[in-house]
Amino acid sequence: MYAPIYEALVEFRRNRVVPFDVPGHKRGRGNPELVKLLGKQCVELDVNSMKPLDNLCHPISVIKEAEDLAAEAFGAAHAFLMVGGTTSAVQTMVLTASKKGEKIILPRNVHRSVINALVINGATPIYVNPDVDNRLGIALGMKISQVEKAIEENPDAVAILVNNPKYYGICSNLKLIVELAHEHNMLVLVDEAHGTHFYFSDDMPLSAMAAGADMSCVSMHKSGGSLTQSSILLTNSTVGPGYVRQVINLTQTTSASYLLLASLDISRRNLALRGREAFKEVLAMAEYARTEINNIGDYYAYGPELINGDSIYDFDKTKLTVFTLDVGLAGIEVYDLLRDEYDIQMELGDIGNTLAYISIGDRMREIERLVSALYDIRRRFKRSRSGLFDHEYINPSIVMSPQEAFYAPKEEMIPIRETNGRICTEFVMSYPPGIPILAPGERITQEIIDYILYAKEKGCSMTGPEDPKIERLNVIKEATIY
């Protein structure tokens, strides 16, 4: 099967072209330490756009061919190779579908990239606050009744955005949401960052393109095998590809990395040829791990038994999320123990859960090692769960739009303990998963303050505010609120 970008790079390297263009390391000759780190072949392929290699801003040859092949592989009308991560793809969806003053319906527990896009374009979010699983403390999918209510109250909304699947594997009834939206002339945008594998297995939840969504983005570097920061934006025929390209070019680099582009091209070919077989093995490993971990005791590796037909319409069984509070340890504490004591790097550790991201590069022996380490952690560190927080998500109170709040006059660097009742102008979140605890325009409550301080104390990786220590926050000047 053809991989046009990869093959053009191989041909380019064979021709031994003399470089009087950028990058300035000139195939690595100017930076021997970089060559030693990455290897000669890798650095020699770090090249700039040129005739035989096409141009990502306006593709007409090998990049265009690679995008057409990606669209075919994913069942889309059009595909766009993205080198700014799925963050860039998500922002392109929002900026394509909406503009200043227009309404967009979305769950509040979205990735920060969505709210960043609203800061940029001034669209008004209509938040659907998700239900929360009281035992696991995690936010669930969009209930159909919630979506219907949001549409009824905001018939002038231009789009609905759905994050599907969520970090923990939970999926909404995407097909019915698409039908409801299209009945009311609204576009459907799907943040499908964690769902690349949905397109290459019949044992996975429904993909966005198969559900009829208008736009979707898949993080190929997450479960698809490409290099970090590479992603693909997918669209159906309801969205004009020329305009989408214009929106992409508003923010994406004009110096696209051919290492990232080639990795997308090769990974697309790999999934098209071997994806179904590979993800069958991934699914088997995840199911085995879930069973073994649940047999240890106290841990709960949850799965499709959570499905309730609405807010948990389906479940991505490749997601291995382990609830840890019954061991007496926060998820981040188990995450740290696995890394520091057992040399196992998990994807996520939060207040109540730790997540192992299982994909095409994993092997059964590593699964066994993880199971053994969790068994040992329970044996060595189990304690009472008293005093542990038991929820991840707090429904916020929205006072102003993200754009209004971000650019409003502010009082800077107020001690966080003194901000109760004030309106935040910046983000606060644990990363991963990158879902804001606070976003611009939201009222700070004592519950939120307590949660932030607790997450910091437990060692969660906190990001977002201007103050890197997250001891102070910027808030709206009182006279600004109206």
Image: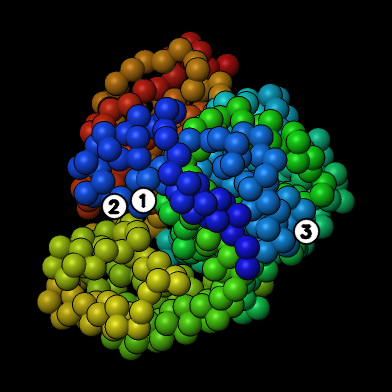
Nearest the camera: 117 or 399? 117
How many angstroms separate mark 2 from mark 1 (CA)?
6 Å
Q: Nearer the viewer, mark 3 or mark 1?
A: 1
Measuring 76% from the left and 36% from the top, which residue is drawn there?
A: 242
Identified at 36% across, 68% down, the residue is: 356
Q: Residue drawn 21% across and 49% down?
A: 36
Q: In this view, does 211 lie to the left or right of 247?
A: right
Q: Nearer the viewer, residue 28 or 146?
A: 28
Label 3 with label 1: CB-CB less than 8 Å: no
Type of residue at label 3?
Gly
Give x and y (percent) for residue 1: 63, 68
Which picture quadrant has residue 198?
A: bottom right
What is the C-alpha distance between the residues marked 3 and 1?
A: 39 Å
Give, as a three-letter code, the residue at label 1.
Cys
Asked whether residue 174 is in view, the answer is no
Residue 466 can be seen, yes or no: yes
Per the model, the C-alpha gap separating discs 2 and 3 is: 43 Å
Label 1 secondary element = helix
In the depicted structure, whether residue 384 falls above or below residue 213: below
**Which residue was labeled with disc 3?**
212
Of callouts 2 and 3, which one flags the residue occurring earlier in the amino acid sequence? Answer: 2
Label 2 neighbour load within 10 Å: few <14, some 14-19, many 20+: few
Q: Name the residue under label 2.
A: 39
Of 71 and 371, the residue lying toward us: 71
